[in-house]
Image: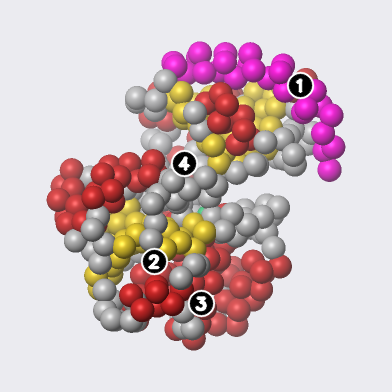
């Protein structure tokens, strides 16, 4: 973080602080926000966590009901007050305005200082202070760094450790992604020393499925997975009707794309999901194939090299056709890449 002394000075007296997670928060954004909130409360600040939209049920264990205010029509005024009147607004696990959804104009109007803690590419939020590192495996890692930087490592308790571990374990897909570093493991070791039961947190995250989510997974794998060996690509399309049929909840399609990528010999995986007003795409790749470039060039998106997202205004069938028509262009690149 640049100008850490200026930041410390600002934080040396109690501040009114609002922490914002990103739209459709995942375990990293929500966990990092809650760990940061616990820490700042210990430093006698007045703290509230906001989310632009609801979080998946498998993260319910993280929150007490009043810990996080979700933005919707009934909380609109409250959110606006909390953001525009805060002394300090933290943006956690995102650095582009787009991820704020309905909260975007409020953050742009905020009179307090804006602090960004994040590891995503291409930041566009105008921040007064930022702890931004694209090499961090998770924002949770940066929250750990941040507390250390403030000289308060000894304030990290078991609950905060659980939040940080949850962010780390999910963003690295259980320490599997290439973003995983020695540091990710060392932080985990510190958290275990503190008393964080890593197995319990893993079970809360990964063995906490609803029956309908698993039924949906079974259906998607059996009926919807398309494998294109000639392009080393596999993809799913999921319609609104299918989501309704399986009582789809936020987060239920999360991770589905990774099943496509787990097929031996597949290097590029895509999921196309129909939403009421837009079609969303998630891209995953292995190795050098740049999923973010593909998303940026063709689907108005972006992200990391191996994990990216995009959107389209076309009907879902046409999005699928567009994807299929683009693949031949990438055939050489995909076929020439080493698999292991
Ligand atoms: Mn993250």
Q: What range is drawn magenta here?
A: 314-340
**Residue at image mark 4:** 252
**Residue at image mark 2:** 34
Q: Earlier in the sequence, mark 3 or mark 2?
A: 2
Are the residues at dot 2 and dot 4 in contact (C-beta closer than 8 Å)? no
User: Which is nearer the eye, 253 or 76?
Assistant: 76
User: Residue 254, can we see it?
Assistant: yes
Question: In front of the other: label 2 or label 4?
Answer: 2
Question: In front of the other: label 3 or label 4?
Answer: 3
**Could you say which quadrant of the image residue 196 lies in?**
bottom right
Picture coordinates of residue 299, whole percent (x, y): 52, 26
**Residue at image mark 3:** 149
User: For the point 28% across and 51% down, which residue is it?
Assistant: 107
Question: In front of the other: label 3 or label 2?
Answer: 3
**Residue 331, numbered circle:** 1
- Secondary element at image label 1: helix
Mark 2 residue crowding within 10 angstroms, few (<14) / some (14–19) / many (20+): many
Q: Earlier in the sequence, mark 2 or mark 4?
A: 2
Q: Earlier in the sequence, mark 3 or mark 4?
A: 3
Q: Is residue 154 magenta?
A: no
User: For the point 71% across and 67% down, which residue is it?
Assistant: 182
């Amino acid at each position: 973080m640049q100008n850490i002394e200026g930041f410390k000075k600002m934080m040396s007296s109690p501040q009114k602080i609002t922490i914002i997670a990103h739209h459709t928060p995942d375990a990293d954004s929500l966990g990092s926000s809650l760990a940061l909130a616990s820490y700042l409360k210990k430093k006698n600040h007045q703290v509230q966590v906001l989310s632009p939209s609801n979080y998946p049920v498998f993260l319910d264990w993280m929150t007490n009901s009043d810990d996080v205010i979700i933005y919707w029509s009934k909380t609109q005024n409250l959110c606006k007050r909390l953001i525009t009147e805060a002394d300090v607004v933290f943006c956690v696990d995102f650095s582009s305005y787009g991820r704020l959804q309905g909260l975007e104009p409020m953050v742009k109007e905020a009179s307090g200082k804006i602090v960004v803690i994040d590891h995503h590419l291409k930041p566009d939020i105008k921040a007064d202070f930022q702890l931004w590192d694209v090499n961090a495996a998770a924002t949770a890692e940066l929250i750990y760094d941040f507390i250390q930087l403030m000289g308060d490592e000894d304030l990290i308790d078991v609950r905060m450790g659980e939040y940080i571990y949850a962010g780390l374990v999910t963003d690295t897909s259980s320490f599997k992604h290439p973003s995983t570093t020695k540091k990710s493991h060392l932080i985990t070791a510190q958290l275990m020393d503190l008393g964080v039961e890593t197995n319990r947190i893993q079970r809360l995250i990964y063995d906490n499925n609803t029956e309908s989510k698993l039924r949906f997974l079974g259906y998607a794998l059996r009926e919807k997975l398309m494998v294109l060996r000639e392009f080393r690509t596999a993809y799913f399309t999921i319609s609104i009707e299918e989501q309704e049929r399986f009582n789809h909840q936020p987060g239920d399609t999360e991770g589905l794309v990774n099943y496509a990528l787990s097929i031996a010999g597949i290097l590029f995986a895509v999921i196309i999901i129909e939403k009421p007003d837009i079609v969303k795409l998630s891209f995953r790749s292995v190795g050098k194939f740049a999923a973010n470039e593909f998303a940026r060039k063709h689907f108005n998106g972006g992200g990391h090299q191996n994990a990216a997202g995009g959107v389209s205004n076309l009907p879902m069938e046409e999005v699928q056709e567009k994807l299929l028509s683009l693949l031949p262009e990438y055939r050489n690149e995909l076929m020439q890449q080493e698999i292991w």
